[in-house]
Amino acid sequence: MIYNRLLTERHVLGVILIFSFFPLLPNKFKGLSVISLLLVTLFGNVKKSVNIKELLVNSSLFIIYLFSLIYTDDYKFALSKLETGLSILVIPIIFNGFLANFKFNLEFKVKFLKLSIIFSIFFAFISLLFISVESDSIYCLNWNTDKFRNISSQLPLIGQHPIYSSIFLSTPLFFFFELIRMKVISTKVKQLFYVFLLFNVVLLFMLSSKGVIISLLSVFIISALIEFKNFKLAIAAIFILTCFFFFSRRAKELYKVEVYNEINESYSTSIRLGIYKCAFKLIESNPIFGYGIGDAQRELNLCYAYESNILLKNRFNSHNQYLDILIKTGFFGLLVFIYFILYNIRKAIKSSNGLLLQILFFYCLIFLSENILLRQSGVILFYFLIIFFNHSMFVINLKR
C-alpha cells in the first residue's frame, strides 16, 4: 500500500523527536504528539511485534480506571478523565504493542537528549523574557510572592501550571548529566550547556515548586553518592537544598506553626493538610476499590463542604498521586500502580539504566505532593519518558 512505501523507520524516529520539543508544543496540540506517533507506527512500514506482559503492566493504571466504571455514577466526568489519561494506554500500545523489538542506537538517544536540553532552554528563556517584560512587578519586592508563578502560567500558547513547567525544566538536567556520563559531548558543548542551563535553574527557583525542587535535589544527592561516588556534588546539592529552605517563602512555610493550626489559603502546605485530611477520610470509608474515576472528585468536594469553604471554593484535587489512585480505585488500584513502578525500577536496575532510575525516583517523589497524571502535560511526558527510556538501551539497524 502507498502508506507502507511512504512511512518508514526513519519517520518513526522523526516523530519520536517531536517529544524533545514537548515544552514548546502549544498546550492544545500536546496530545497530537502521541496521536502522530501512533499513526506512524500503525500505518508505517515497520516490523511490528508485541510484548504482552509489558503492554499489560505499563497500561495497567488505565485498565484499572476502566474497571472503576463499573461502580462509578458520573459517567460523563469519568469519560472526560479517561480521555485526558488516554496516553496511559496509547503509549504502551505504541512501544510495547507495535515496537516491542524496535531498537534505538546510541546516536539517536544522544540526539534526543541534546534536543530535549536545547528546547527546554528555549522554554526557560522565553518564560524569563515574558516575566521580565511584565510591567506590574517590582522584582525586589515580588521575589517572595507567587507573582512569577502566576505570570509564567499566563505565557501565550505554552504557559503551564508551575508544577509542569518545573518538571520541563528539571528533566533536561538529568539528560545533561547522562550525556556527561556517556562521554559523548565535547568540552565546548558541555561548557555551553552549563551556561545556558542556568536559564532552567533560575526559572526553576523563581517558580519555587517545592515538591519538584526537593525531588530533583534529592535524586541528585542519591545519584552523586551511589552512582557517581562524587561527594562534592552531593554536598553542593545539599547546600542548594538548604538555601532553598532558608530563603524561599514557599519552603519556609513548612516550619511555620500557623500553617498547621488551621487551613490558611496563604500557605499551600496548610491547604494540602486540609486536602489530605479529607482524602484519608474517604480512603478509610472505601479502602478496597475506591469511588471510581467519575466520583472521586465529587466525594472530595462533599468532604470539603464540611471542612472548609476555602477547599470547597477551589475544588482542589488530592495533590498526591498515590492518594488520587487510592480514592479512585482503592488499595487494589494502588497495588497495581506500585507494581508498574517496581517493574520498571527492576528493569532499569537489571539493564544498568541510570537515567531511567533517576527519572523514576524523581517522579515517585513528586507524586507525594502532586497529581501529575491528571493533565496531559503530566501524563504524556511521564509515560513517554518511562517507556521510551526502557527501549533506549537497544540498537536499531536503519535502512539506508
Image (cartoon, grey):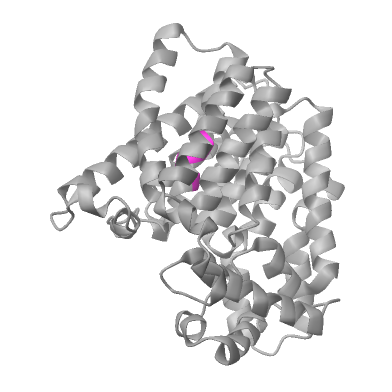
**Left or right of 134, for residue 224:** right
What's drawn in magenta, residue-wise? 167-172
Query: On the rendered image, what quadrant is the C terminus found in?
Result: top right
Can residue 22 be seen at all in this image of the molecule? Answer: no
Q: Nearer the viewer, residue 150 or 18?
A: 150
Q: Is residue 148 above or below residue 6?
A: below
Image quarter of residue 332: bottom right
Front in this rendered view, residue 139 or 113: 139
Spot occupied by residue 132 in the image (x, y as percentages of width and height): 19, 45
Q: Is residue 335 left or right of residue 302?
A: right
Tell me which residue sits at (69%, 17%) in the image: 229
Furthest residue toward left: 135
Q: Is residue 202 left or right of residue 259?
A: left
Q: Position of residue 367 (x, y in %)?
A: 64, 55
* Magenta part, dominant SS: helix
Give the residue drawn at x 48%, y 58%.
253
What residue appears at the point 83 percent right and 77 percent down from the top-left corner?
287
Question: Where the N terminus falls, by quadrant?
Answer: top right
Percent position of residue 184, x then y? 55, 12
Number of numbered markers: 0
262 to 90, vertically: above or below: below
> At 48% across and 65% down in the image, what residue appears?
268
Q: Position of residue 383 (x, y in %)?
A: 64, 49
Task: Say which quarter of the image contains residue 103.
Answer: top right
Outermost residue to the front: 257
Q: Is residue 134 visible?
A: yes
Above or below, comparing residue 128 to residue 73 in the picture: above
- State yes or no: residue 17 in magenta: no
Residue 141 as seen in the image, left or right of residue 171: left
